[in-house]
Image: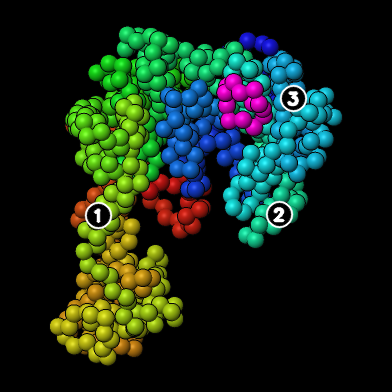
């Protein structure tokens, strides 16, 4: 067997599949572009999902990649196990080869076997194979193609050897190649065999034979063009090639661990508690560095909160090994230095990375000390009372008050040989969410009155034609006061008017509604505001002269000056967004806005307040664009079309 570095294995794999006709595809970002079902890219097939589903075609039918992956948060979550095992990671690299209706089982088996036994030179006598219990074809192919003894081909059930994209969709049996690390590794039981949860028979490479489509009833039918999706973990392969029982003992982590040793004065391998801390910091720094380089910043929700949890867990473990000053950005520098050639986005974002990490680490350090002090006091009290479990209410209080993620509480509880009432924690969190929801909605929204529902069900009163004109002749469909229709609205009357068609823009997306006038045959009303009720466009009016009647033919006139002022401020938000991204970085995203004729507000994501110099630079960029007096072009596109053309905000 060749002793290979992680970098050499990555290169050998991609070169091997390139020679065998595969297109080498760069890793996709960790933030899935068009897949809200996933928090993070967690396998090589994610960027090819639409190809497998038949929704997209590529110029090639064979591909191979080395995909950066994160498994933290959501369904695929390894966060709490990192540090305690030899192979759990939040960030890892997945080598994979793929066929889109090109080669199938026979070739996939041959490629995998040849790479492991000829390129890597793994001893054939150490390899085992599993197949799905009903996959007679794969069970036949393995001995036939590779020469492996049939008694080393083990049939396992659906839980281990059947893959599905979801409850419905493409699915199929899979085969795994395993390496026997010998009786000295793993559980040590004399009856240990393939299928045991220990590390002796280590899974190396999973080959998915995507050959069926499962419908809502569970019925499976053969796919017209079967596909191949495989995954080989780089860190695991490096451990085997380097004769290591832990991924953390390979060259992939050596530079990171050396940096942490130097910063902390601790030596890796001397005691378990320090080893756990060093492994957590090494792994979590890799994950944080790659996530931030892909444009994510810490926040209190969604993906940003998972990143925050990862960083905060690393900060807490820094305290375990005596690190008091900010340290993660120093470890991140090693990630950039060692992996920047393979992933250029790391070098491109290196300066920004340090700022984000330092800010997040410093911010959390201020509250971490207080939170841990309260936790230590609670644990001491519980031990004195001979109790072995931290209550869920107390755990949530620490999270809510000091921002301690539950991962940190679980780590401390484990170190103190105590449990944590996770169910109680989740109940307390749910109760807090419900209180917040009620506070936000302190009035109960009543069901829309009958007249509104009748208009909606008839598909009336919802047609906006204001992109093309600010003046339009229409008809009054309804005049309403507090949800009750009236026939005639006299001078001085204030209420709501719904027209068959309108050029008035209803408040939406942060932009205020249009104002203007309504002219009828017997009167005139001022439009004070325009807003939505469901899909209805509602004009808030005050009759100034004469009267208006339901059914009247009317002329609707938008205040053109106010509309133009609002449009200018709307354009300014786009200029501001662009300038902020130029000055602060491409991580800046719109988080809300308010656009009116006389002012605008633009909310955006960033990790700290702007400095006076940054504000000045943003202002200068926006004013420069305004002075150039460029033509503004408007196009009406679907959301999908706009996103395909890289539209922002």
Question: Residue 45 versus residue 144: which sits nearer the camera?
Answer: 144
Residue extending farthest to the right is 144
* Residue 290 numbered mark, or none: none
> Which residue corresponds to mark 2?
220
> Which residue corresponds to mark 1?
436
Residue 60 at least partly seen: no
Q: CA distance from mark 3 to mark 2?
A: 29 Å
Residue under the point 28% across and 30% down: 360
Displayed quadrant of residue 234 = top right
What percent of the width, then of the height, locates residue 481? 23, 82
Q: CA distance from mark 1 to mark 3?
A: 56 Å
Q: What element does badge 1 sit on? A: helix
Magenta-drawn stretch contains 293: no
Q: Residues within 10 Å of mark 3 (few under 14, many from 20)?
A: many
What percent of the width, then of the height, locates residue 580? 31, 37
Q: Which residues are magenta?
A: 186-199
> Which residue corresponds to mark 3?
113
Q: Earlier in the sequence, mark 2 or mark 1?
A: 2
Q: Are marks 3 and 2 in contact (CB under 8 Å)?
A: no
Q: Earlier in the sequence, mark 3 or mark 2?
A: 3
Question: Residue 470 versus residue 326: which sits nearer the camera?
Answer: 326
Q: Are marks 2 and 1 in contact (CB under 8 Å)?
A: no
**Above or below, comparing residue 290 to residue 406 in the picture:** above
């Amino acid at each position: 067997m060749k002793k290979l570095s992680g970098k050499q294995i990555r290169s050998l794999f991609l070169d091997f599949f390139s020679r065998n006709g595969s297109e080498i595809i760069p890793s996709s970002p960790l933030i899935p572009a068009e897949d809200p079902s996933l928090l993070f890219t967690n396998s090589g097939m994610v960027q090819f999902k639409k190809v497998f589903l038949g929704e997209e075609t590529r110029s090639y039918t064979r591909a191979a990649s080395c995909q950066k992956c994160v498994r933290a948060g959501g369904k695929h979550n390894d966060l709490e196990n990192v540090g305690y095992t030899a192979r759990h990671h939040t960030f890892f690299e997945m080598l994979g080869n793929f066929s889109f209706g090109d080669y199938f089982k026979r070739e996939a088996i041959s490629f995998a076997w040849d790479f492991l036994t000829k390129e890597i030179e793994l001893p054939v006598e150490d390899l085992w194979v599993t197949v799905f219990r009903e996959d007679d074809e794969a069970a036949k192919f393995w001995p036939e193609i590779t020469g492996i003894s049939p008694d080393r081909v083990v049939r396992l059930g659906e839980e281990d050897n059947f893959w599905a994209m979801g409850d419905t969709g493409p699915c199929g049996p899979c085969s795994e190649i395993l390496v026997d690390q010998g009786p000295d590794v793993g559980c040590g039981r004399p009856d240990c065999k393939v299928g045991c949860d220990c590390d002796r028979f280590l899974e190396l490479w999973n080959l998915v034979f995507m050959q069926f489509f499962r419908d809502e009833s569970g019925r499976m039918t053969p796919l017209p063009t079967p596909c191949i999706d495989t995954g080989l973990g780089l860190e695991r392969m490096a451990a085997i090639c380097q004769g290591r029982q832990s991924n953390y003992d390979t060259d992939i982590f050596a530079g990171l661990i050396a940096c942490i040793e130097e910063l902390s004065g601790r030596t890796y391998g001397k005691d378990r508690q320090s080893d756990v801390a060093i492994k957590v910091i090494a792994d979590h720094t890799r994950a944080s560095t790659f996530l931030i380089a892909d444009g994510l910043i810490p926040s209190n929700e969604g993906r940003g909160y998972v990143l925050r949890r990862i960083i905060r867990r690393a900060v807490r473990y820094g305290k375990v090994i005596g690190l008091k000053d900010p340290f993660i950005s120093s470890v991140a520098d090693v990630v950039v230095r060692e992996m920047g050639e393979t992933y250029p986005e790391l070098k491109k974002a290196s300066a920004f990375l340090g700022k984000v990490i330092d800010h997040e680490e410093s911010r959390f350090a201020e509250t971490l000390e207080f939170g841990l002090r309260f936790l230590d006091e609670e644990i001491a009290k519980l031990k004195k009372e001979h109790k072995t479990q931290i209550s869920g209410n107390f755990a949530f209080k620490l999270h809510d008050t000091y921002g301690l993620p539950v991962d940190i509480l679980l780590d401390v509880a484990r170190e103190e040989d105590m449990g944590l009432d996770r169910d109680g924690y989740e109940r307390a969190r749910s109760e807090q969410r419900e209180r917040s929801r009620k506070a936000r909605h302190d009035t109960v929204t009543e069901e829309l009155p009958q007249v509104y529902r009748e208009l909606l069900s008839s598909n009336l009163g919802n047609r906006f034609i204001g992109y093309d004109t600010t003046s339009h002749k229409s008809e009054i469909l309804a005049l309403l006061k507090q949800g009750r229709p009236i026939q005639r609205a006299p001078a001085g009357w204030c209420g709501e008017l719904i027209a068959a068609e309108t050029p008035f823009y209803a408040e939406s997306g942060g932009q205020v509604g249009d104002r203007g006038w309504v002219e009828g045959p017997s009167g005139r009303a001022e439009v004070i505001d325009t807003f939505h009720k469901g899909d209805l466009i509602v004009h808030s009016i005050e009759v100034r002269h004469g009267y208006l009647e339901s059914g009247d033919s009317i002329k609707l006139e938008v205040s053109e000056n106010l509309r133009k002022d609002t449009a200018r401020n709307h354009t300014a938000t786009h200029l501001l967004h662009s300038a902020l991204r130029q000055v602060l970085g491409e991580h800046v995203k719109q988080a809300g806005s308010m656009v009116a004729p006389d002012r605008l507000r633009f909310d955006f994501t960033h990790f700290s307040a702007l400095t006076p110099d940054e504000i000045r630079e943003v202002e200068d960029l926006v004013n420069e664009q305004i002075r150039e007096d460029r033509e503004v072009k408007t196009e009406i596109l679907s959301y999908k079309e706009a996103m395909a053309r890289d539209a922002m905000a």
